[in-house]
Image (cartoon, grey):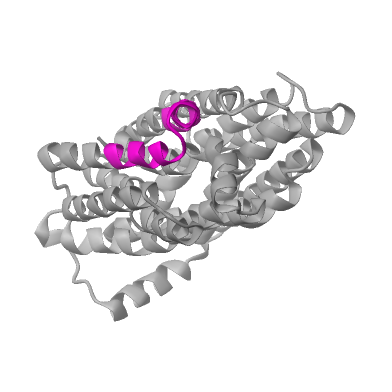
Amino acid sequence: MLAGLAMMGPFSVDTYLPSFPAIRQEFAASPLQLQQTLSVYLMTFAVMTLFQGALSDSFGRRPVILVCLAIYTFASVGAASAQSFGQLLLFRGAQGLSGGVGWVVGRAIIRDTFAGHDAQRLMSLVTMIFGLAPALAPVIGGWLQTWFGWHSIFIFLALYGGMMLAVCGLRLPETHPPEARQPFALAPLVANYAKLGGNASLLLLCLTVALNFSGTFLYIASAPAFIYDLLGLGENDFPVLFVPNIGGIMFGAFLSGRLAGRVSAQRTVALGYAIMFGAAALNVGYNALFPPALPWSVLPVMLYAIGPALVMPSASLLALDLFPKNRGMVSALQSFAQSGATALTAGLVSPLISGSGLTLALGQAAMMLAGGACWVLYRSRAANP
């Protein structure tokens, strides 16, 4: 169930990417406007994650998940029936307000229920199953676009949201007991976030995960340009990028689970960065010398994706353990950092650099190096508190 909830996010982002040309034609939208359908979703996603974790700390995990699933289903129906580009943006924003609940509250549920290596194994398992969504989403989206048009993609998302609402309503347990909850009030909420936001170690861990993943997400956000313009492929060819990319994520998550209890979190993160550095160097080197072509343009992207999946479970658990009484809020802050970074990647970075294979590769390398700098600073603070 937690993996299914987490998959709502990538389904919301990736399923409609093959429909960009059709949406642009129907609403006479510019490429930059189309990117905003992604950015608006991610920005509202990021802002709402700050409240979802806090609400789950106050009212319990289960009711927050159920309410957000109902909102998501309604918003997907609205997007499917949008009659103007403005309406589509509005309902994409509503999807973002609710679409992050599975990942935010799900991480808190894992930490409520398991400790230590068991928590890392379950986090890795959820990440591995969740990794199926970005591989499946563009395939499903391409089929639906070909057969029924872009409106059918949002009908599919509404059906998925409704299915998860029914399943969670019947089977999802409450893991945050009433005696452990904190009163919900705006002033204490702001004070708690100020406390968390003022903790340098927590912020560095959040940025480590966010920047690493942004290196992968850059290619997801740039997929229409990468597939249509750089590789010259069609609307049913998105799997040539997404399947290897998600294969890398799933392998990294599997490896993280296997290393749990055998290798320290610090060594696991170091291995992740070694893989990302090698993949980014290969990506820059190839694109500096050769034009985009299969399979060489995709291979380094797949290898890079292993690294963030290795780093994320260990770094996330280190962050959650900094504030055991505020795990929902810590998880929310993690998601806010990741969603904010991906929103900037989609809305600002991708439109600027997606016209060239080399600039995409350099952008990925820059994000990885920035994430690595955050991890080094965190380790320095941990060694000298």
Main secondary structure along the magenta-highlighted residues:
helix
Q: Is residue 380 visible?
A: no
Q: Residue at x 66, y 31 (%)?
A: 227
Outermost top residue: 295
Residues drawn in magenta: 132-160
Q: 227 or 57: which is nearer to us? A: 227
- Residue 303, compared with residue 163, is above or below; it is above
Residue 162 lies, in percent from the top left, at 23, 41
When asked about the image quadrant of residue 137, the answer is: top left
Q: In the image, is 330 to the left or to the right of 165?
A: right
Q: 210 or 327: which is nearer to us? A: 210
When asked about the image quadrant of residue 248, the answer is: top right
Asked if residue 143 lies in the magenta stretch, the reply is yes
Q: Residue at x 75, y 48 (%)?
A: 353
- Residue 59, compared with residue 355, is above or below; it is below
Residue 35 lies, in percent from the top left, at 59, 52
Q: Residue at x 47, y 66 (%)?
A: 199
Q: Quadrant of the N terminus?
A: top left
The count of marks equals 0
